Image (cartoon, grey):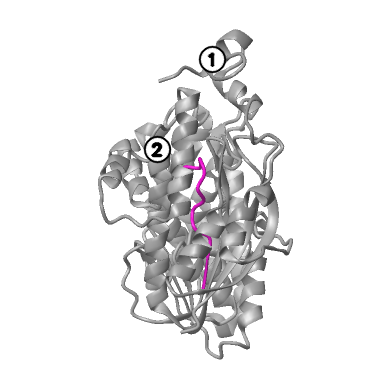
Amino acid sequence: MEKPQELFQGSPLSTGMTARQFHILHSPKCNGTASADSKKYLLTLGVKIVDNPQPIQFLPNTDEPVHRWSPYVQGFSASFVQRTLTKYKAKYKTPKVLDPFAGCGTVMVQAKLQGIPSLGLELNPLLKFIAETKLNSWMVNPDALSKIVRSLVTNHKSEAPEFLKSNQHFNPGVLNNLERIKGGIDYFTPATEEEKPIKDLMNLAFAAILVDCSNLKRSPCLGYSRNKFVHDSVPFRLFNSKISEIAQDLRLLQTRFVDSMKTYAKMKLADSTSYQYRDCYDLVVTSPPYMNGLDYVMNYKIEMGWLGFAQNHKELKKVKDNLVVCDNVSKGLIREFASKDDRYSNDWIENIKDQVYGNILRRGAYRRPDMPEIIHKYFDDLHKVIQNISLALNRGGRFILVVGDSLIADVYVPTDLILARIGRELGFTIERIEKARERRSGQIRTYKLRETIITLLKEF
């Protein structure tokens, strides 16, 4: 294998730069754009990307009733979902909505507010719990919730999982008070059926404050915050504030959305690559995991640990390996995938893999040398999802995906266009591809990526 310094002018060793800094400086993608690199793919597909700037990120949801009960930085906005539902309301007289990557339930919550039945699939048990609680707690008496929280017995501590008890995660005083709050929630025994959702709401509120109480930040990846200081009293203050917020929203729901209370909204802990749908749907609205370096499980390890969905990193890894692939999955999983003969592929994917292989070879080192196979598995996973959904969508139904493209080892990956092509191969018509916003590559900050909305139509 050739060494990097034999291929470039200078090297990390001779310049004093780190390998990452060196490769960023010498990247042919510096100041590049997805728009330029997409042209050949668009020409082959025979479609255009329409500029349609709009807010599609989760951040605005932090001010929206119900959606704000739990933060989820990878989600999309309730306003986008609402615009989509409104747009097709007249098209489908009694629509049914599906989200195969439901996350924290934004699509289902917004559909329920509009009285539209919905189903959500999610493989992360924490997110499934969050979404389910946001959907199934609308009848809780807000005064009863507040009264029970005020009377919590907080002298029965529930200890945090061992893998989260490091002082790096929580200051000792903060940790003690979190264990007291969790102990109070665990000690509470619902006296009636009506009180059962209250315990879920308290756990939801507790999970929602954990990162703010920790020495960590999520922006968007979970990491340590050097200058963050959390006072010992913060857990109680934030928990009570979140409960007050939930109680306020319950009052709103019970006065303005009475007719929506009994609307069907179901969450399933299920794999969207293989789930057998019993019903057919008119709208599929979703945002699949992106082909990037974000670990969708480790990013929520704090909440998963405290709520009992994982007791150690081994259990977290097991959840992660079942999801659509990210670049932090186990090497054994990728080796097993690479040995399979029945994988989906096309010439675009194979060409991208070859380029990534070549660039990794030229660099001499890369964080994941098996990255080409990770890319391949990502599209194989999503091919299964789209194929499965094509069977569950009514004729005239639409499959709407929000997704971002990627830059990997100096190779542009047009995720949106590859998924559009897969959709066409599976019988969909590419009705529209819209650019909602511009993004920056995490590898080369001067490279302009995009986030798009793909609309696939099932005509036949």
Residue, disc 1: 5
Query: Up-down: is 393 above or below 109?
Result: below
**Do labels 1 and 2 touch, CB within 8 Å?**
no
Q: Amino acid at mark 1?
A: Gln
Helix, strand or loop for disc 2: loop
Q: Amino acid at mark 2?
A: Ala
Which residue lies at the image location 50% right of the left edge and 63% below the top edge? 421
Query: Up-down: is 51 above or below 112?
Result: above
Helix, strand or loop for disc 1: helix
User: Which residues are drawn in magenta?
Assistant: 284-296
Query: Up-down: is 95 above or below 251?
Result: below
Residue, disc 2: 160
Secondary structure mostly seen in magenta is loop
Can residue 49 be seen at all in this image of the molecule?
A: yes
**Location of residue 107 by image quarter:** bottom right
Sooner in the amino-acid sequence: mark 1 or mark 2: 1
Q: Which mark is residue 201?
A: none
Whether 47 is among the magenta residues is no
Q: Position of residue 454 (x, y in %)?
A: 58, 66
